[in-house]
Image: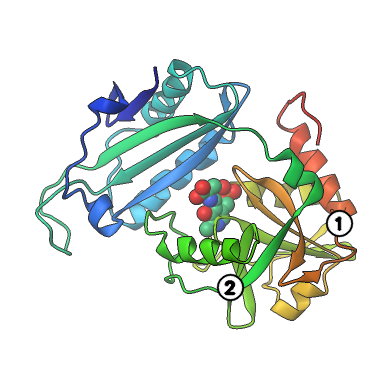
Amino acid sequence: MEWILHNEEFIQEDELKISKEDRGYQFGDGIYEVIRVYGGNLYTAKEHIDRFYESAEKVKILVPYTKDVFHKLMYDLVEKNEITNGQVYVQITRGSFVRQHQFPDSSSPVVVAYTKTVERPVELMQNGARAKFIEDMRWLRCDIKSLNLLGNVMAKQEAYDYGCFEAVLHRGELITEGSSSNMYGIKNNTLYTHPATNLILDGITRRTILALCEELAIEVQQTPMTKDQALQMDEFFMSSTTAEIIPLVEIDGFKIGNGTRGVKTEKLQKAFEAKLNLGVKI
Ligand code: PDD
């Protein structure tokens, strides 16, 4: 039996009723979060919850409960579904109203959250994946974790069509991020990544990685890499809540470094894992 959170209620999937005029469904008018569960605990919950509220505020949707209540609802959902290792997906839309572009005078936001058991992508973490450069065609508020993911979806699909795992998005020559991840290059002892501006999502995993760089004495330069610079890096990797840290060993058919997981990437993975208190070793 799988429980779903609908506003403040825990229900079964077949009880979930979403209006045909829900603005999330018609306009992508809403925001979301993906929170990882390790050992039954919500990992970096506070950061994800804060970002959920920030995204909602940026699009002027009022989350109908306090952060503490929200946290408890997420935790209860994980517990009710007996999730040990997995994720919570949670979204809020502006609610339903007769279709019109401008905000309705009155509509109640609709929250839906559900859980899923997921494994860590251990094989990819070890062996790495291939990526493809794709022009970043998204809007200019990528800092908002918006439900509007068409640009991301199109880019990811194009990468998959080329047998690649992720799209390395670029605006002109400058790399921004991945279709559902952040991007990093390492050259000598310096890690390069796009600064947290409106052009990328400031990933929670990204923040952890930048903190780990300090612990590992890896210098950080938050400046965008050009495509050419990316191909000249010693190491390249992507990060996200579900992917954690995955080495990108080939971009557009060009090998990065020696085409295998880099030494510093592996160090970061180990340091990242050490914070998770897991038995599994990567
Ligand atoms: N995606 N950039 C984009 C465009 C993303 O969609 C994501 C995450 C990230 C990484 O953020 P974080 O480390 O906080 O997960 C960066 C999630 C996992 C998703 O949409 O499934």
Q: Which of these two is toward me, 161 or 224?
A: 161
Q: Amino acid at mark 2?
A: Ile
Kindly tell me whether mark 1's CB lies below 8 Å from ligand 1.
no
Quadrant holding the C terminus: top right
Within 10 angstroms of label 1, few (less than 14), some, or many (20 or more) residues? some
Q: Judging from the image, what secondary structure is the residue with disc 2 in?
A: strand
Residue 134, which numbered label?
2
Q: CA distance from mark 1 to mark 2?
A: 22 Å
Residue 128 drawn at (x, y percent)? 77, 52
Q: Residue at x 11, y 48 (%)?
A: 106
Q: Amino acid at mark 1?
A: Thr
Q: Is residue 257 above or below residue 277?
A: below
Q: Is residue 76 above or below residue 160?
A: above
Q: Is residue 217 left or right of residue 209?
A: right
Q: Residue at x 64, y 82 (%)?
A: 173
Q: For residue 177, what is the image quadrant?
A: bottom right
Q: Residue at x 28, y 47 (%)?
A: 93
